[in-house]
Amino acid sequence: MAKPFLDVLKGDRRDPPPIWLMRQAGRYLPEYRELRAKAGGFLDLCYTPEFAVEVTLQPIERYGFDAAILFSDILVIPDGLGQDVSFVEGTGPVLKPIRSATEADLLSMDGLQKTLAPVYEAVSRLTGRLGAETALVGFAGAPWTVACYMVEGRTSRDFHAVKSFCYSDPEGFGRLMDLLVEATVAHLSAQVEAGVDAVQIFESHAGVLPEPEFMTWVVEPIRQIVAALREKWPNLPIIGFPRGAGPMYVPFAENTGVTAVSLDTSVSLDWAMDALPVGMPVQGNIDPVFLLTGGNEMDRAVERIIDACRSRPHIFNLGHGVDKQTDPKTVQRLVSKVREFSS
Ligand code: CP3
């Protein structure tokens, strides 16, 4: 049976648009919080296939989304490369920061496949657990965004450490980025081999670089990843999410080779319909804060977005992830509202 999410990525329109949400599994769901408490640490949750499968399926069981996203995190790559990674309650991710090429050179691909094997095991179990109309999405962080966490050591506001590294030693920083490209290709390839239908590349910190550095550290590494995947799977659907890229969404869409782009909340849809390559599918882009307030205002935002995207293949999604304060009932209202629509 056809999967509407994949049909749209092939370039067909569907009315109503297929829907899934970034961070659709997570702390806003009581069943997630319950399992999370049982699992212990966040990485234990990611590396225990039984738990990862369960958490991936929770939002599918509740809402019947058109796509399930593998439950994991972008920071399993630095963990697999040998960096110390932990998740601290109330703080978020904490990594032992890498501040020079010498420190970066200590990382290696040697343990990656072994550390990440449970992730691929979760993928292969999931393929047997989803309905015929539900797609399975694998993912990875883009090298620049992952490097931001690896160098800063935590969530950052100003990105001084990572920018200082790449501006002052582009050659050394380039070696770290080459390693991340290699690790990302290996990680996404293993997910495809285990059975995901499509992949999304999260470039959450695309919006912090000047244009020349954006081309070097955002566009070029992603182009290499897409090219390596397409060599093995010419038709693999790949969604790019260069959050905050603004007008640079256009060179991103034109030069990386991605199948589709996920639009963040601040992107003007009228502009995007005009400026992006002809026929390229888009995903997005309701402000997740509408899900905190809900009501008629949220319904109107849904209508506006679906109307604005009528000239392209469109997947309904958020402009960023579901906030942990979101009421699960509001997500239900959102899904019902999107599904009421038809041309
Ligand atoms: O449902 C899904 O979307 C699948 C799973 C998923 C998670 N993280 C689970 C998670 C995905 C796709 C991600 C991607 C991710 N992780 C990104 C890119 C997207 C974005 O949000 O910009 C980034 C930057 C990360 C890094 C990361 N992981 C941060 C900054 C945090 C802490 C923030 C927070 O909400 O606490 C995490 C932890 C994390 N990843 C949680 C979840 C459900 C919360 C962990 C918990 O239960 O305590």
Image (cartoon, rainbow, N blue to C red):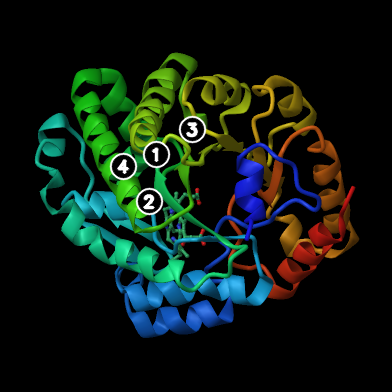
Residue type, label 2: Val
User: Tag 3: Cα neighbours inside 10 Å, few (<14), some, or many (≥20)?
Assistant: many
Mark 2 or 3 closer to N-term?
A: 2
State which mark lies toward you, 4 or 3.
4
Place of residue 333 in the rendered image (x, y in percent of width and height, measured from the top left): 79, 68
What secondary structure is marked by label 4? helix
Q: CA distance from mark 2 to mark 1?
A: 9 Å
What secondary structure is marked by label 3? helix
Q: CA distance from mark 4 to mark 3?
A: 17 Å
Verify CB contact (< 8 Å) between mark 2 and mark 3.
Answer: no
Residue type, label 1: Trp
Place of residue 81 in the rendered image (x, y in percent of width and height, measured from the top left): 19, 49
Q: CA distance from mark 4 to mark 1?
A: 15 Å
State which mark lies toward you, 4 or 1.
1
What secondary structure is marked by label 2? helix
Mark 3 or 1 closer to N-term?
A: 3
What secondary structure is marked by label 1? loop
List the residue tagged with mark 2: 192
List the residue tagged with mark 4: 184
Verify CB contact (< 8 Å) between mark 3 and mark 1.
Answer: no
Q: Which quarter of the picture shows residue 142?
A: top left
Q: What mark, if any, has residue 233 been given in the picture?
A: 1
Query: Relative to residue 326, is residue 177 drawn left or right?
Result: left
Q: What mark, if any, has residue 206 been given in the picture?
A: 3
Q: What mark, if any, has residue 336 been given in the picture?
A: none
User: Tag 2: Cα neighbours inside 10 Å, few (<14), some, or many (≥20)?
Assistant: many
Mark 4 or 3 closer to N-term?
A: 4
Q: CA distance from mark 2 to mark 3?
A: 25 Å
Verify CB contact (< 8 Å) between mark 4 and mark 3.
Answer: no
